[in-house]
Image: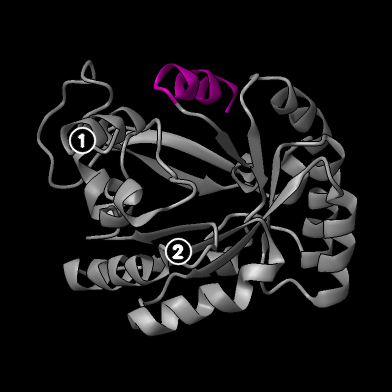
């Protein structure tokens, strides 16, 4: 994670997100399925990461958090995603809330809090964040993509829960990606700070056209490879190149 933070800065990132739940995983670089290229010299093209889940007691979290908190001078988002939202944290919700409390104590620029965290706990975490740490209110529907109007309603319903509303949907095809695009277009003049994206084919459309759609924050990756487009993700340098070609900046 510390190495990736340095790489992200070199690629031009303005902010880095640290997925604390990934501390409980082990990554192995493997040949991407359906890809015959074995040349690892081209920034990992043709490879993807295979993730193995670790047990809760296999990680010294406090030590890891201390290392992470000083690994970069860029603003930092701290996130600990539960499994039901597509994350990898292996503990209970109460244990995850304690992780979030510890994360907030490091005074990151941003803390990611899911919109479905129960009211009393969420209120406590927001109060702990105070004025030093801003809140990203995130929602994840990794099973499907609702209609554009339903997506827009999800965002509007969550606008008071954080400075940014992040919404991520599982996309199966380009039509699903277009639904997210249409919702982002509908919301672009709403005054709500949004970060919309998809995970799957077509999910990168909103990221690529984020300046046109008025997105407040765009998530990219330091990872490279042909498989990213099938996952709805995009490399940070490729994203900046796309914006330049499209004359978005």
The residue wearing badge 2 is: 168
* Residue 92 in sight from this viewpoint: yes
Q: Nearer the viewer, residue 207 or 50?
A: 207
Above or below, 16 against 41 in this view is below
Task: Using the numbered discs, state the Cα–Cα distance from disc 1 to disc 2 in whole angstroms.
Answer: 26 Å
Q: Please provide percent x and percent y for residue 115.
A: 66, 70
The residue wearing badge 1 is: 247
**Image quadrant for the C terminus?**
top left
Q: Residue furthest left?
A: 36
* Residue 146 in sight from this viewpoint: no
Judge left or right: residue 127 versus residue 208. Answer: right
**Image quadrant for the N terminus?**
top right
Q: Main secondary structure of the magenta part?
A: helix
The type of colouring in the image is one colour
Residue 61 location, quadrant: top right
Task: Name the residue: 40% across, 37% down.
Answer: 221
Circle 1 sits in a helix, a strand or a loop, which is it? loop
Extent of the magenta region: 1-12
Above or below, 196 against 219 in this view is below
* Residues at marks 1 and 2 touching, judged by CB atoms closer than 8 Å: no
Q: In the rendered structure, does residue 242 fall within the stretch colored magenta?
A: no
Q: Please provide percent x and percent y for residue 126.
A: 83, 58
| Number of other residues with Cα within 10 Å of mark 2, as a class: few under 14, some 14 to 19, many 20 or more | many
Q: Please provide percent x and percent y for residue 76.
A: 64, 34
């Amino acid at each position: 994670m510390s190495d990736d933070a340095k790489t992200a800065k070199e690629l031009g990132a303005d902010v880095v997100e640290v997925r604390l739940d990934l501390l409980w995983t082990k990554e192995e670089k493997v040949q991407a399925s359906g890809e015959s290229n074995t040349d690892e010299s081209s920034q990992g093209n043709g490879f993807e990461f295979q993730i193995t889940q670790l047990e809760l007691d296999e990680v010294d979290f406090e030590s890891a958090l201390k290392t992470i908190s000083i690994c970069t001078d860029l603003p930092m988002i701290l996130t600990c995603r539960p499994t039901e939202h597509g994350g990898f944290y292996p503990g209970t919700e109460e244990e995850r809330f304690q992780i979030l409390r510890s994360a907030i104590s490091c005074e990151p620029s941003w803390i990611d809090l899911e919109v479905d965290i129960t009211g009393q706990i969420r209120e406590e975490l927001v109060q702990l964040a105070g004025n030093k740490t801003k809140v990203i209110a995130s929602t994840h529907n990794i099973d499907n993509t609702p209609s554009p109007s339903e997506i827009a309603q999800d965002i509007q319903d969550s606008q008071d829960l954080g400075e940014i509303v992040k919404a991520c949907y599982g996309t199966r095809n380009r039509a699903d990606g277009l639904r997210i695009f249409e919702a982002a277009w509908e919301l672009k003049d709403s005054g709500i700070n949004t970060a919309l994206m998809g995970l799957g084919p077509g999910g990168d459309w909103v990221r690529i056209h984020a300046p046109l759609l008025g997105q407040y924050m765009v998530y990219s990756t330091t990872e490279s490879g042909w498989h990213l487009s099938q996952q709805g993700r995009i490399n940070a340098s490729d994203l900046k190149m796309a914006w330049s070609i499209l004359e978005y900046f």
